[in-house]
Amino acid sequence: MASTRDRLIETAMTLFYQNGFHAIGLDQILDEVGVTKTTFYNHFESKDDLILEVLEMRDTREREEWLRIMRAKGGDDPRSQLLALFDLLDDWFHESGFRGCMFINAAAEFPSPNDPIHQAAARHGHLFARELRDLCVRAGADDPDTLTKRLLLLVAGAVTARHVDLDDHAATDAREAAAIFVDHHCPPVESRPRR
């Protein structure tokens, strides 16, 4: 059985994702878990502290899961793994309860760049960008920084188009654009100049 702390984090993660950070009060989380405020404050200093823990757990899980799925869908080819990111997005976008990106949502609800919650959301983006850049390098990108930036812009645009506009084709359209960028920056091995 999960610890009280873990149950608070898991429950808050679900409620925050489905409803927003400001829309969910501490009492609702405590009622759902079945604990008192005293118990809560034995584990967390504040609701903001809980939000930071939620974002940290979500970050670790999401990045690990996304990279695992990209490898599974893309096989051994890093180029295919890069494009598999958009297949992953398409699957995610069509899940029941999709509410956009928790980290984009957090940054929007806590807009000050000095807010620790905003900083935690930004940190997720930086960590994922670093992992994506590593994959761009393995794919043989001539300019991995530019390719990473372009792919991340496509991801953010697809997430926004699906979340805000309910665009059913956001991920597949972004994948088509990503394929152009990947082909441009990562020529197939057989067409690369020999050194």
Image (spheres, rainbow, N blue to C red):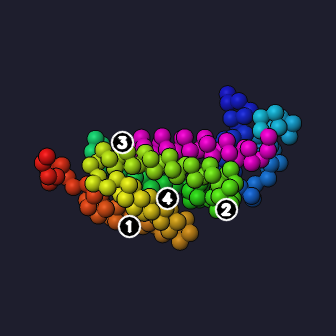
Residue lying furthest front in this view?
Answer: 195
Residue 14 image point, x, y percent: 65, 48
Callout 1 amino acid: Asp
Task: Label 3: state its secondary structure.
Answer: helix
* Disc with the residue nearer the chain's start (1 vs 3): 3
Looking at the picture, tell me which residue is in the foreground, 62 or 133: 133
Percent x, y of residue 57: 60, 41
User: Which residue is disc 2 drawn over?
Assistant: 111
Q: Position of residue 25 (x, y in %)?
A: 79, 53
Q: Image point 45% across, 63% down: which residue?
A: 153
Q: Main secondary structure of the magenta part?
A: helix
Secondary structure at badge 4 equals helix
Q: Is residue 110 magenta?
A: no
Give the camera-side residue of 120 and 10.
Answer: 120
Q: Which image quarter holds the N terminus?
A: top right
| Element on which disc 2 rests | loop
Indicate which disc, 3 or 2, sits on the residue closer to the N terminus: 3
Q: Which residue is mark 4?
A: 93
